[in-house]
Image (cartoon, helix red, strand yellow):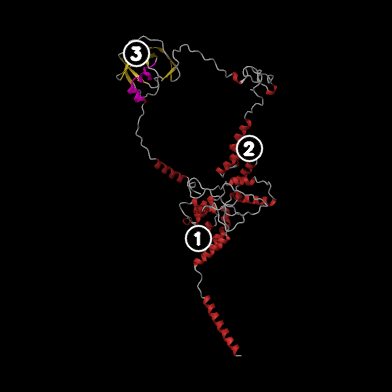
Amino acid sequence: MQQQVQHQKTLDAVMERMERLFSAMGATPAAAPASTAEFVTNSLSTRLPEFTYDPDNGCTFDVWYNRYEDMIANDASTLDDAAKARLIVSKLDAATYARFTNHILPKKTVDVSLDETVKTLKDLFGHNTSVFARRYAYLRTQRNDETIRDYTGLVNRRHEMAEFNDVTPEQMKCLVWICGPVNAEDADISARALRKMEDDPQTTLNECRNPTVHGHQTRCQAPRKPAFITTVWYVSQRRPHWAKDCDFANKTCYDCKHVGHKKGYCKNFTKKKKPIEKQKRRSANNVVSVASTTAHVTPVTRIYRQVQINGITVGMRLDTGADITLLSHKDWIAIGRPKLLPPLVSLKSANNKDINVRGHFKCNFNIDGHEGRGNCHVADTTSLLGLDWIAQDEPLFRRLTGGAICNVSAFTLDTLRASLTKQLQKQFATVFAPGLGRCVKSKAHLTLKPDAKPVFRKARPVPYAALPRISQEIDRLVAADVLSPIDHSDWVAPIVVVQKKNGSI
């Protein structure tokens, strides 16, 4: 009996302690707001799927955000806009996140507001084709090898991508008009009309038709090429005929020795070279070209020299393009009409016209105090001091043929290179953005053998001195999202380490 009483007292004491404990637990204050925000963020992060950009299959950010916008707005109502922006950015896959961060540089994700984040993501990861092109593709949808279920899903997806709820009756008429032609000849008509609708969404059916009517009618009314061959290889009569009907198809030509035509109708018939006429007067084996002496040209600065010929001073124009020295008929009379010998050369001007040469004479001359002797030709042109006399005046000839040193001022190459680099980096910021560039226009698919079995190969041994560089290179590839770390895999293949010429891995 005493034991029962003692047991009852112990039980009452335990119950009293439990009541005090429960009272104390009920009086505990609520969790801190930070803990609540963290709980909401973790909950939404678990429920929201990761966004992967795949425009070919309709996986754009518009579709993803419209689907989960209500969840983000209502279930995350206790979060501020910055937390919502961080939540959305955390659901981007690696490729999408890298492209987004490269686009907002030099800003960081924490510096971009919620509205700006959503707008930027919609612009970057929207449809890569216009709405009219998607509507055109929707109306041209055909079933190929898909099952009925897959084909139904394709129609539903293209209908949503085409945004047909916003199409106007006039736009619908234009789309049906564009999709109507099935001939290959009318493909350019549909393409031009589709481009016009993309440029002006309010294009009417008549405006869509007008640019194509003229071109179509012109093509239909253009004169057709005659089906009859007018010029053939085997022409032997005045009338044109088919090659198979030629009477000389097996005849050998005496000119070109080819079979298929008669003499006088081969390719080489019109290409025979005419005999070169013999020149009547060739005292020398050269024809000298002299600058044009026409006075009706734009005035330019000429260089003249005072030359003494047989003691008489004559003003002559210095011409380094003339191989010989020429004297005008007027100056020839002024120096006393020396006896002329037959000309040694034939002269042509710069426009390939012949120059009348009256003859030549030998004489002594003086240029700037330097004596010389040579031939001088008298011609119906101005007096020219040619290279044959200039070469005998060594100081003058050296000044004309010697090199010149010019003072050149220019920017340094390093300054120009740095300026050009900054300009290119600013103009093509996406190309110079940090990280590895990737192609987002197509998607690669791997087809595995159905009966393939996993293969596990151990890592190959590498030199101990190369381990730090290998680890550093692997970390770099992981940071660039080229490699992805995993905990376990049934398929394992060792890497091959190759050292480049510059010492890198």
Q: Amino acid at mark 2?
A: Asp
Residue 83 circle label: 1
Q: Which residue corresponds to mark 3?
A: 363
Mark whose residue sits in front, 3 or 2: 3
Q: How many marks?
A: 3
Q: Height in image: 269 above or below 420?
A: above
Mark whose residue sits in front, 3 or 1: 3
| Residue 277 is covered by the magenta coloring | no
- Which quadrant, please, contains the N terminus? bottom right
Q: CA distance from mark 3 to mark 1?
A: 103 Å
Q: CA distance from mark 3 to mark 2?
A: 83 Å
Q: In terms of secondary structure, where does tag 1 sit?
A: helix
Q: In terms of secondary structure, where does tag 2 sit?
A: helix
For the magenta stretch, what is the residue range? 381-400
Q: In terms of secondary structure, where does tag 3 sit?
A: strand
Q: Amino acid at mark 1?
A: Ala
Is 386 or 143 nearer to us in this picture?
386
* Sooner in the amino-acid sequence: mark 3 or mark 2: 2
Is 87 or 468 nearer to us in this picture?
468
Q: CA distance from mark 1 to mark 2?
A: 54 Å
| Residue 384 is covered by the magenta coloring | yes
Is 275 or 301 nearer to us in this picture?
275
Quarter-of-image position of residue 70:
bottom right
Is 474 or 362 nearer to us in this picture?
474
